[in-house]
Amino acid sequence: MNASLANLPSASIEATPLLLPLEFDAATTALVATTTLVPVQGDGKPAPLPSGAPGGGAGTGAAPAGGGGLGGFLPFLVIGVVFWFLIIGPERKNKKKREEMLSNLKKGDKVMTNGGLYGKIAELRENIVVLDTGDVRLKFARAAIQGTVDGDD
C-alpha cells in the first residue's frame, strides 16, 4: 500500500490567503464581514453586478469615505479648548496671584508657611524670609510661604 502511494504524482497545493471585505455597521458600531459573492467570468475577472444587486449598478465606485480635514481634527480641538479653560487657565491665574503675593511681602506681615507654621516677618532678603514666632526666629525660603494671615494667632 505504501508502494502505491509513492508512485502517485505529487500535486502542488498553494495556500491562498482569504481576504474578507469588511464594512462598518453604524447600528452596532462594529466591523462586519460582507457576504456578497462576486460572480467571476471565465477569464477570472469579476463580472459586473446587476443594478439591483447589493454593491452593483451605477454610481457605486470605490470612492473612499472622506472624513479628513477639519472634521477629523475638530474633536481634538474642542478637547484642547475645554482642557485649557478647566485646567490650564485657572492654574496660571492662581500661579500669577501667588507670585504677586510673594513679591508684595513686607516686614511685619503675618504669614503661614506650607508646613503650617505661623509667624511674623522679621527680615526679608532676596529669596529668604526670617520669621519671628515669638520665641524663635526661623529662616525659610520665600517660596515656602503659603499666604498672609489676617487677625491674631
Image (cartoon, rainbow, N blue to C red):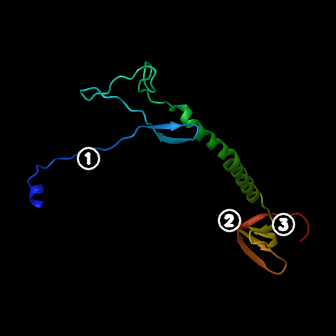
Image quarter in which the N terminus is found: bottom left
Q: Residue at x 41, y 37 (%)?
A: 21
For label 1, the crowd category at 10 Å Cα-Cα, with few meaning under 14, some 14 to 19 and many 20 or more, is: few
Between discs 1 and 3, the one toward the N terminus: 1
Q: Would residue 107 be found to the left or right of residue 79 on screen?
A: right
Disc 3 marks which residue? 108
Q: Could you say whether the residue bearing mark 2 is in a helix, strand or loop?
A: loop
Q: Residue at x 75, y 53 (%)?
A: 97
Residue 33 appears at what percent x and percent y? 45, 40
Q: Could you say whether the residue bearing mark 1 is in a helix, strand or loop?
A: loop
Distance in Å between CA atoms under marks 1 and 3 = 88 Å
Disc 2 marks which residue? 127
The type of residue carrying mark 1 is: Ala
For label 3, the crowd category at 10 Å Cα-Cα, with few meaning under 14, some 14 to 19 and many 20 or more, is: some
**Residue 46 in which image quadrant:** top left
Residue 153 appears at what percent x and percent y? 89, 71
Q: Residue at x 53, y 37 (%)?
A: 25
The type of residue carrying mark 3 is: Gly
- Residue 117 is labelled as none
The type of residue carrying mark 2 is: Asn
Number of marks in the rendered image: 3
Disc 1 marks which residue? 15
